[in-house]
Image: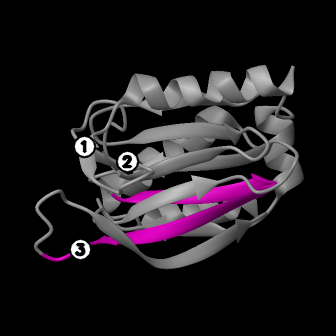
């Protein structure tokens, strides 16, 4: 069974040893290699939400539970991330900036479907959108190399793909809207 405190301590130790994502990726991969153990330690997802397991200036550990068919618009993190899937599926579209576009527009550059037992690193320059493409809750451990809630970053308008400041509160409300659709 995943021990939350031990998991966070292992992530902190990995970052203390190497500030890149490499050590954390190994910690996350080890955890999600036993999805039943993660479910036992974190609990069966019951609602869409972002559970803060640990937040500091150098590390954020979240349990992200996506609502069925939920989508988060293109955004960046301005720090590395490691996504570890323990239930469901997370589809990511990766984006790149359109060269010399005055509005900071982006264009699609690739995609990856993340499934149970995947532990996928994302570099600090990555722009991605996320969709839970299935009709059930999806759970993933997200670990970031900084304070996820305090860094200035961008999101892109879903209609014209122009850049604007990321709105943490608005994006957290998307999880509550997903719960309202479940009710």
Q: Residue 87, percent across and down?
A: 81, 52
Depth check, front residue: 63 or 126: 126
Depth check, front residue: 20 or 149: 149
Judge the density around disc 2: few (<14), some (14-19), many (≥20) Cα neighbours within 10 Å. Answer: some
The quarter in which the N terminus is drawn is: top right
The quarter in which the C terminus is drawn is: top right
Residue that badge 3 annotates: 98
Judge the density around disc 1: few (<14), some (14-19), many (≥20) Cα neighbours within 10 Å. Answer: some
- Reply above or below: 93 against 157: below
Depth check, front residue: 149 or 176: 176
Q: CA distance from mark 3 to mark 1?
A: 15 Å
> Magenta part of the protein: which range?
80-99
Give me the residue at 84% from left, 27% from top: 182
Residue that badge 1 annotates: 164
Give me the residue at 54% from left, 46% from top: 72
Q: CA distance from mark 2 to mark 3?
A: 14 Å
Asked if the residue at tag 1 contacts the one at tag 3, i.e. Cβ–Cβ closer than 8 Å, the answer is: no
Give me the residue at 29% from left, 42% from top: 58
Q: CA distance from mark 2 to mark 1?
A: 7 Å
Asked if the residue at tag 1 contacts the one at tag 2, i.e. Cβ–Cβ closer than 8 Å, the answer is: yes
First in sequence: mark 2 or mark 1? 2
Q: Residue 131, percent across and down?
A: 64, 54
Splitting the image into 4 quarters, where does residue 106 fall?
bottom left
Q: Residue 66, percent across and down?
A: 70, 41
SS at badge 1: strand
Whether residue 183 appears in this view of the structure is yes
């Amino acid at each position: 069974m995943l021990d939350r405190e031990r998991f966070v301590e292992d992530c902190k130790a990995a970052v203390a040893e190497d500030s890149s994502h490499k050590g954390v990726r190994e910690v996350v991969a080890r955890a999600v290699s036993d999805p039943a153990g993660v479910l036992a330690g974190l609990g069966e997802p019951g609602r869409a939400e972002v559970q803060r397991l640990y937040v500091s200036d150098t590390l954020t550990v979240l349990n992200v539970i996506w609502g069925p068919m939920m989508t988060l618009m293109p955004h960046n993190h301005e720090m590395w991330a490691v996504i570890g899937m323990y239930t469901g599926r997370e589809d990511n579209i990766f984006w790149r900036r359109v060269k010399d576009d005055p509005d900071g527009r982006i264009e699609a550059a690739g995609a990856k479907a993340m499934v149970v037992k995947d532990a996928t690193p994302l570099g600090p320059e990555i722009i991605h959108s996320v969709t839970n493409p299935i009709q059930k809750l999806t759970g993933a451990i997200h670990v970031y190399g900084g304070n996820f809630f305090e860094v200035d970053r961008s999101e892109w308008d879903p209609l014209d793909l122009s850049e604007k400041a990321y709105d943490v509160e608005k994006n957290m409300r998307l999880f509550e809207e997903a719960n309202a659709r479940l009710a």
